[in-house]
Image (tube, grey):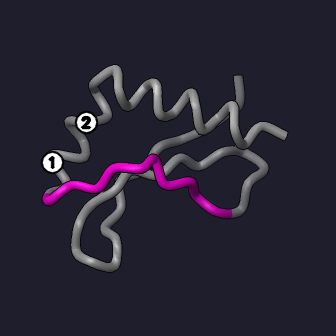
Amino acid sequence: MADYTVTIEQVSDGKWACFLHLQGHDQPIHLGKEFKSEERAENWLNVSEAETAIEMMIRQHKK
């Protein structure tokens, strides 16, 4: 499986989103969800929906 990291960043509308950073890709990949607080985004990363989203994005962006 690809080497990756996931970060939580504030987006332009003030919400928080999770981004996948894949080795070999310049731009982070938005995981498709936005939250009202950083804490909610962090909690989402602990559920299976987040794991599924990460796995799907890795498969889609694999070189």
Q: Residue at x 47, y 33 (%)?
A: 53
Q: Residue at x 27, y 77 (%)?
A: 13
At label 2, counting other C-alpha atoms closer than 10 Å, the crowd grade (few under 14, some 14-19, many 20 or more) is some
Q: Is residue 30 magenta?
A: yes
Numbered tag placed on residue 30 in the rendering: none
Numbered tag placed on residue 44 in the rendering: 2
Would residue 38 appear left or right of 48 to someone viewing this image?
A: left
Q: Position of residue 23 (x, y in %)?
A: 72, 45
Q: Position of residue 58 (x, y in %)?
A: 65, 35
Kind of residue indicated by mark 1 = Glu
Tell me the chief SS of the magenta region: strand
Q: Residue at x 35, y 27 (%)?
A: 49
Residues drawn in magenta? 27-36
Upstream in sequence: badge 1 or badge 2: 1
Residue at which label 1 appears = 39
Q: Position of residue 11 (x, y in %)?
A: 34, 71
Residue placed furthest toward the bottom: 12
Would residue 13 appear left or right of 51 to someone viewing this image?
A: left
Q: Quadrant of residue 1?
A: top right
Q: Is residue 57 magenta?
A: no
Q: Secondary structure at mark 1?
A: helix
Kind of residue indicated by mark 2 = Trp
